Amino acid sequence: MAVLYGALGGVVIPYAMSLFEKWGIDDPVGAISVHGVAGIIGLLLVPIFNSDATLQAQVEGIVVIGSFVFITSIATWWALHKTIGIRVGEEEELSGSDMWEGTGSAYPEFMEDGLQTLIKRRK
């Protein structure tokens, strides 16, 4: 079942990455798609193959986990913003941090033209 769950998650991840990009959510390494979307799919599939699990318990788990991650992430990002900062310079932002720091685009095969989208949004 783990292979089936993983395969389904692997099929959904590129679509989720493209959707988040269209929504303007900055997730250059696809962490939300991999851990969030694929994780939710995995949790929702558990009752199908495990008669002891219930869909209600899985949804409650998603809400609890999501709430914890959201609250702790907001607190962490706020603390970083107030202390060392969280923004890169405008040139790095426009060219892409992955290009600036690593001289290569992260997941170029899944992204539409991210730089052009960012430039259009800024105009």
Image (cartoon, rainbow, N blue to C red):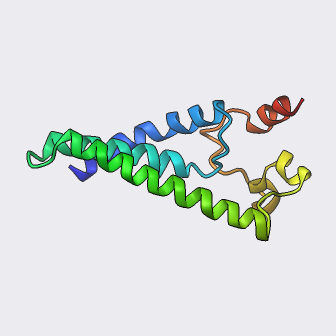
* Residue 92: image location, x then y, percent: 86, 54
**Residue 39 shows up from this direction:** yes
* Residue depicted at x 64% and y 36%: 21
* Residue 89: image location, x then y, percent: 88, 56
* Residue 18: image location, x then y, percent: 59, 34
Left or right of 13, for residue 64: left
* Residue depicted at x 90% and y 50%: 90
Q: Quadrant of the C terminus?
A: top right
Q: Say if 120 sits above or below 29 in the image.
A: above
**Residue 4 shows up from this direction:** no
Q: Quadrant of residue 8?
A: top left
| Residue in the foreground of this view, choosing between 5 and 51 | 51
Q: Quadrant of residue 73?
A: bottom right
Left or right of 2, for residue 116: right
| Residue in the foreground of this view, choosing between 93 and 98 | 93
Q: Say if 66 sits above or below 73 in the image.
A: above
Q: Quadrant of residue 76?
A: bottom right
| Residue in the foreground of this view, choosing between 15 and 64 | 64
| Residue in the foreground of this view, choosing between 116 and 32 | 32
Left or right of 119, for residue 37: left
* Residue depicted at x 65% and y 49%: 28
